[in-house]
Image: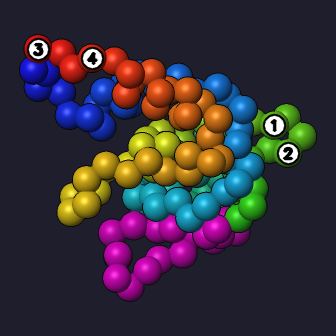
Amino acid sequence: MSDKMLIDVLHENFVCGKCGACCRHGGQIRITPSEAQEIADYLDIDMSSMELFPFTAHIDDPDYLYLEVCDPCFFWDKVERTCMIHEVKPAACRGYPWMLFKDNGCLLSDIIICPSVRVDLAVVLARPVED
């Protein structure tokens, strides 16, 4: 039996179709202050200008900032049809569409939105369990 967790198998086997559906539909993205700094550096703007972006802090989760729900994502370039911060995208975006929650296990996020995940999930679930 494999020692790998299901979340690891799902991540390593997922092949993004680069359709941008996840970004075009947006959502609330949780980022760390260091990820916000990395985004600011990448965009060559001062952190004080980050107030122009729709980030908010939450009292219940003070260690993170949240990119407010936008449709499409604030960083989705509608002309080029690409993510403006792809090279420095936050962990929440890098981990999409699989999320691991401490208390509730693995969650498949937005299976209706992501066409690649349906194909990927079928392949992973059809594979025999390793000994």
Where does residue 131 sit, x and y in percent of width and height?
A: 11, 14
- Amino acid beneath label 2: Lys
Residue linked to disc 3: 131
- Amino acid beneath label 4: Pro
Rounded to the nearest angstrom, the CA distance separating label 3 from label 4 is 9 Å
Magenta part of the protein: which range?
Answer: 51-69
Rounded to the nearest angstrom, the CA distance separating label 1 from label 2 is 5 Å
- The question of residue 68 being in magenta is answered with yes
Compared with residue 114, is residue 119 higher up or lower down, i.e. above or below? above
Nearer to us of marks 2 and 4 is 4
Tell me which label, 3 or 1, sits earlier in the chain.
1
- The question of residue 83 being in magenta is answered with no
Rounded to the nearest angstrom, the CA distance separating label 2 from label 3 is 47 Å
- Amino acid beneath label 3: Asp
Whether tag 3 and tag 1 are in contact, CB under 8 A, the answer is: no
Tell me which label, 4 or 1, sits earlier in the chain.
1
The numbered dot on residue 128 is 4
For the residue labelled by badge 2, is the local secondary structure a helix, a strand or a loop?
loop
Where does residue 68 sit, x and y in percent of width and height?
A: 61, 69
Whether tag 1 and tag 2 are in contact, CB under 8 A, the answer is: yes
Residue linked to disc 2: 78
Where does residue 20 sit, x and y in percent of width and height?
A: 71, 38
Residue linked to disc 1: 81
Mark yes or no: residue 41 visible.
Answer: no
